[in-house]
Amino acid sequence: MGRSLMVSLVFFAIFVAGIITGGFLMARWARNNQGRWQRMNQQQQAVVVPLGPMLVRQMLNQLDLSRDQRKTANKILLEAADTLHVLRRETDFANDRMQDDIDKILMPDQRVKLGKLKDGQRVRLLEQREAVQNFLKERRKEEAASGPNAQPPAAPAAPAAATQTQPAPAPVATQTQPAPAQ
């Protein structure tokens, strides 16, 4: 009985030593990787604003670029615009094909309901565009009134209709006018 108790205590001691060693190693690892976790949190909290060639061009016009910088920037912007144009056409084609394929599997009443959902999504997208345009107009007015050293205002909140559980609107880069309701 004494020998089995001794073996049990040794196994228990080894187990406790493993827990303590693991805790120290984990604490050291966490301390060494703290910066990585902070960067990941910052990246998740950052708001990503896609900058297209036209917007970048407007920003570059405000930077007093040299002739060489302007020439290089124009070349980069033209290449990006061409690439984006090709990608938009491919995306439009893929979206059209997807919608046609989905349409084939739906019943007539489901197609009607899908049309209504698309119309609602189109309205929310147009509301968001209008909110962004109004925000940009107000920002330009404030910048003009306060000068170049003023702080920019906060970004506009999304419209109430867009915060529902509906899926986010698909980016419509090439559409200039809303499509007619089906």
Image (cartoon, rainbow, N blue to C red):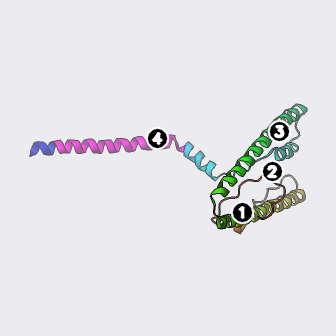
User: Which label is found at residue 174?
Assistant: 2
**In the image, which is nearer the foreground, mark 4 or mark 3?**
3
Residue topped by disc 1: 118
Distance from disc 4 to disc 3, alpha carbons, whole Å, reads 43 Å
Q: Which circle's residue, 3 or 2, is located before the other in the chain?
A: 3
Q: Secondary structure at mark 3?
A: helix
Position above or below: 74 against 139: above
Magenta highlight: main SS:
helix
Residue topped by disc 3: 77
Q: Secondary structure at mark 4?
A: helix
* Farthest residue, direction top: 68
Distance from disc 3 to disc 1, alpha carbons, whole Å, reads 33 Å
Is 73 included in the stretch rendered in magenta? no
Is residue 169 toward the left or the right of residue 134 in the image?
left
Mark 1: few, some, or many residues within 10 Å (few <14, many ≥20)? some
**In the image, which is nearer the foreground, mark 2 or mark 4?**
2
* Residue 160 percent coordinates (x, y): 70, 68
Distance from disc 2 to disc 4, alpha carbons, whole Å, reads 49 Å
Residue topped by disc 4: 29
The kind of residue tagged 2 is: Thr
Q: Quadrant of residue 62?
A: top right
- Front residue of 124 and 10: 124
Q: Which circle's residue, 1 or 4, is located before the other in the chain?
A: 4
The magenta stretch is 7-34
Mark 2: few, some, or many residues within 10 Å (few <14, many ≥20)? few
Is 28 included in the stretch rendered in magenta? yes
* Residue 171 percent coordinates (x, y): 73, 53
The kind of residue tagged 4 is: Trp
**Residue in the picture at 48% in, 44% down:** 30
